[in-house]
Image: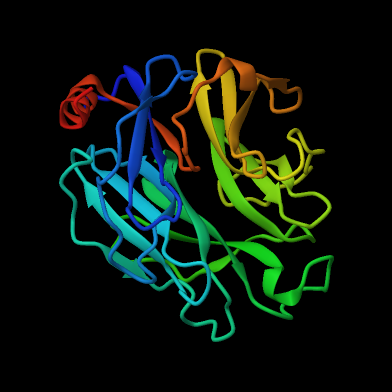
């Protein structure tokens, strides 16, 4: 597989999340050019596509998961592609069907666990009255769950991934080196609704030492990308309908770079991955860029 860091690809969606996958690309990780939408229209579950998360396997195949509904769906959408233009048949993966009271399955996030040659998929769900009552209504008291898979045909049974003692959504895993993982998370409690980090020596945790917030109020949907010696954390400032970002070398000290980035109008949160020049060239031709 040829996957030099020639450029970066940012998955996205547009409200009301019915027209499917949008893409943008960047050469420097800061300035993003819109590649348009229509790459994959949602056809499973509630027929929405929110929070599209992408990862690439060692064989070069792109794998995509997404939120299919605000409430009611007990799983997420999945499809794969070699070129991001021609896609497999979409499937609904019912990871929480064993939980009769589950309210939702939100923002599934893919992480390719290279050391174990598997994919880890994490997401937020609410199961009323399962956890100690916190600040949130029982139908908004989220915790993070996970499954693993090697082939997207067989999945482990869903298990608890993170219970920080408060409602948590929108988690993203980043690996700095062997046995060194960072989890970027949204504290979804009413007075917080901001983004923090936690740390672990194993991809599945336990994640500890949750930080103070490094974003403002009403921020969500983080994604993380390594650019040179810095990690950039992008996030959706959904009250202001703008995008923000910080950079960090250690996930302890963060510098606001929101004035240094440019994302397409209407861009809603997805994930960023490196993309090779051949794949990008074909996407640009399709988009007329």
Q: Which is nearer the eye, 88 or 235?
A: 235
Quarter holding residue 175: top right
Question: In this view, which residue lies farthest toward the bottom?
Answer: 100
Horizontally, residue 217 falls left or right of residue 25, namely right
Quadrant, the N terminus:
top left
Q: Which is nearer the eye, 202 or 143?
A: 143
Q: Position of residue 199 (x, y in %)?
A: 69, 40
Quarter holding residue 114: top left
Q: Position of residue 216 (x, y in %)?
A: 76, 36
Res 180 seen here? no
Residue at 33 percent of width and 47 percent of height: 21
Res 83 seen here? yes
Q: Position of residue 22 (x, y in %)?
A: 34, 41
Note whether 95 is above or below 120 in the view shown.
below
Horizontally, residue 82 falls left or right of residue 237, namely left
Tell me the colour scheme of the image.
rainbow
Residue at 41 percent of width and 64 percent of height: 68
Residue at 60 percent of width and 48 percent of height: 171
Residue at 83 percent of width and 67 percent of height: 134
Tally the numbered discs.
Answer: 0
Note whether 148 is above or below 214 in the view shown.
below
Quadrant, the C terminus:
top left
Q: Position of residue 271 (x, y in %)?
A: 45, 39
């Amino acid at each position: 597989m040829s996957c030099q860091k020639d450029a970066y690809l940012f998955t996205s969606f547009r409200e009301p999340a019915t027209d499917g996958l949008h893409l943008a690309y960047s050469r420097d990780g800061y300035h993003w050019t819109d590649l348009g939408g229509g790459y994959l229209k949602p056809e499973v579950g509630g027929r929405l596509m929110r929070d599209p998360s992408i990862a690439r396997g060692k064989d070069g195949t792109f794998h995509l998961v997404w939120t299919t509904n605000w409430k009611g769906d007990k799983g997420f959408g999945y499809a794969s592609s070699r070129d991001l233009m021609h896609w497999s048949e979409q499937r609904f993966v019912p990871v929480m069907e064993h939980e009769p009271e589950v309210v939702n399955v939100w923002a599934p996030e893919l992480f390719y666990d290279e050391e174990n040659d598997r994919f880890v998929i994490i997401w937020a769900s609410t199961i009323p009255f399962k956890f100690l009552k916190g600040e949130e209504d029982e139908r908004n008291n989220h915790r993070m769950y996970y499954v693993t898979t090697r082939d997207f045909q067989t999945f482990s049974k869903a298990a608890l991934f993170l219970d920080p003692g408060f409602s948590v959504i929108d988690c993203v895993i980043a690996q700095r080196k062997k046995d060194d993982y960072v989890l970027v998370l949204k504290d979804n409690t009413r007075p917080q609704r901001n983004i923090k980090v936690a740390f672990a020596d194993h991809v599945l945790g336990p994640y500890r030492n949750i930080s103070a917030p490094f974003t403002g109020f009403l921020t969500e949907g983080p994604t993380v990308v390594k650019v040179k010696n810095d990690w950039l954390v992008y996030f959706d400032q959904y009250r202001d309908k703008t995008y923000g970002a910080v950079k960090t070398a250690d996930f302890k000290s963060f510098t606001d770079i929101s004035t240094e980035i440019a994302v397409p109008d209407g861009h809603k949160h997805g994930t960023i991955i490196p993309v090779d020049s051949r794949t990008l060239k074909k996407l640009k031709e399709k988009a007329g860029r």
